[in-house]
Amino acid sequence: MSESRAGRTAVVLGGTQGLGKEIVKTLAAKGTTVYLSGRTHESADAAAKEIGQGTIGLALDLSMPETIAESLSSVPSVDDLIIAAIERDANTLANYDVAAAIRLVTLKLVGYTEAVHALRSRLTPQASIVLFGGLALLRAYPGSTTVSTVNGGIVGIVNSLATELAPIRVNAIHPGIIGDSPFWEGKDNSPVINRTPLGRLVTMAEIVDSVEFLLNNTGINGVNLAVDGGWLLK
């Protein structure tokens, strides 16, 4: 998608690395003023300086929801809100880490919702929100109990917020394995590729393009979009 986004303001929570950073780069290159968040001022400011184009860094930790409103206090208005922050968690029943589980549940369910709550009065009438879940909600694996649960919770958040914030649109992306992402690149992903009809893994560019689609298409609302190359079909 090549259209200009000049004059818009976006907030990307979880924008200092990986997929979130690619989203920031794409939006900023098209003229959007982007506020990106990292867990520390240092990480956020470093990413904003690297990306340039007027990008602004914010220190924000979604796992500490009581601090979110203050962390977002400098944002004047929001046309596009993308919450891409995630935390990897392989928490098996045999070695169940209660603190890690609570942190992830808080980050994804309470933190995501509180961020929307904190910015609610500054969302423009045509604002759009894109949240990030993941296909562990449907493709569970040993150790994914918390991950699968919170990603399923994103479906519920999309449904409730799209209703409560109407006519502001709320959607979510649920990626499969992203082959060229820092976490997955270099790993043996052949078992997933072999059961993916596309014959390959999706790319970060394709996920970013999907985010832009959800932001730009004013007829799309309340959608939980799987971007997985057809992996769920087999």
Image (cartoon, helix red, strand yellow):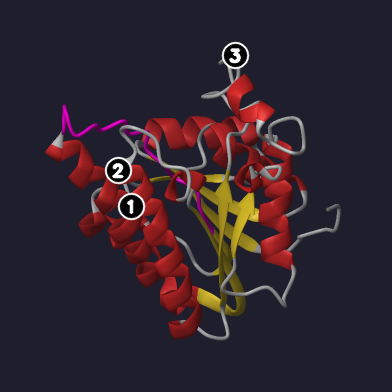
What residue appears at the point 39 percent right and 35 percent down from the top-left corner?
141
Q: What quarter of the picture does the C terminus occupy?
A: top right
Label 3 near label 1: C-beta < 8 Å? no
In the picture of the structure, the residue carrying the numbered disc 2 is 145
Q: Nearer the viewer, mark 2 or mark 3?
A: 2
Is 178 above or below relative to 152? Answer: above
Give x and y (percent) for residue 167.
Answer: 57, 85
Please give the residue where the numbered disc 3 appears in the rendered image. 186
Q: Earlier in the sequence, mark 1 or mark 3?
A: 1
Name the amino acid, label 2.
Thr
Name the residue type under label 3: Gly
State which quadrant residue 94 falls in: top left
Residue range highlighted in magenta: 82-96
Mark 1 vs mark 3, foreground winner is 1
Helix or strand or loop: what does disc 3 sit on? loop
Please tell me whether mark 1 sits on a helix, a strand or a loop.
helix
Q: Residue 219 in magenta?
A: no
Give the answer, above or below, for where 195 lies relative to 55.
above
Task: Identify residue for label 1.
Answer: 149
